[in-house]
Amino acid sequence: MFHDAHCVFRFYFSADGKAHRKLRFTQDNNRYLEVNMQHIIGISSRRLRISTLALLLPAMSWAADTASLAVGPQYDTTHVYVERGKMDAFVDSILKTFGGTSTERVLVNVTPTPSETYSQLILTPAGSFSVFDFNTPIPHPFGTERNGFLVRDMDAAIRQARAAGADVQVAPFDDPIGRDAVIQWPGGVNMQLYWHTKAPNYKPLLSVPENRLYLSAYRVDDFLNSYRAF
């Protein structure tokens, strides 16, 4: 009856100050069933209070950690490595298609080993792009990542990704404006995590961009389980 349901403890306080505990099953189709816990479980209020607290504390700790890492979809960029000398054409075509603005182009080293690339950020209402035009060979595995996700705490993000089953291909390293790392999800999906020393402030997107993945049928479940846990 409750396939794929989530269990949530809820507390209601009456005028006499007594707590009335209910267990709430929620399903993805937003149908709910609430039952009075005292009548079903038949245990004392003190034991129920302690048991409920023991169940909630790990979840509250996990929720606080994950909530502190996310920033927003306008800070998550699609990574584009253009052919040498083709950055102007690409940036112009994106802006003419989606509108928006671009940052000043800079010549930087964005990898932990010596390299040189022109870097430019495109901000559109439909999504953001990090564009790279390398003057030097691109150090592996850079160029294989699909996206860069901004996080509030790099070390916590790496711990959480590893706990979810991701591999760390490039350990966190310093760049001109913060820190970066490259992780890989089951199925071979690479993603860059980044953190800024000075928090950026971009306009919210009008829509969240779609991200398509093509995976082996044997790794789809592994990827979904790992990414959802993250």
Image: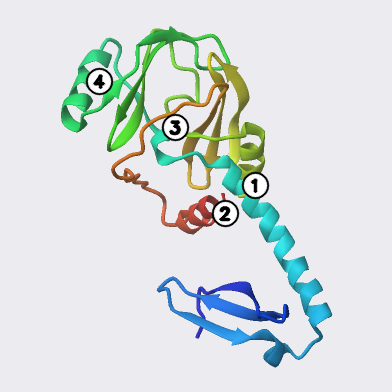
Graded by Cα atoms within 10 Å as few (under 14), some (14 to 19) or many (20 or more), the crowding at tag 4 reads: some
Element under disc 3: loop
Q: Earlier in the sequence, mark 1 or mark 3?
A: 1
Give the distance between the C-alpha atoms of the residues marked 3 and 4, in whole angstroms.
Answer: 19 Å
Q: Earlier in the sequence, mark 2 or mark 4?
A: 4
Q: Dot 1 corresponds to which residue? A: 65
Marks 3,2: beta carbons within 8 A: no
Q: Earlier in the sequence, mark 4 or mark 1?
A: 1
- On screen, residue 197 above or below 151: above
Residue 1 in sight here: yes
Judging depth in this view, the residue of 132 and 185 nearest the camera is 132
Residue beneath the point at 30% across and 12% down = 84
Residue type at mark 3: give it: Glu
Mark nearest the camera among 1 and 2 is 1
Give the distance between the C-alpha atoms of the residues marked 2 and 4, in whole angstroms.
Answer: 35 Å
Judging depth in this view, the residue of 15 and 135 nearest the camera is 15
Give the distance between the C-alpha atoms of the residues marked 1 and 3, in whole angstroms.
Answer: 25 Å
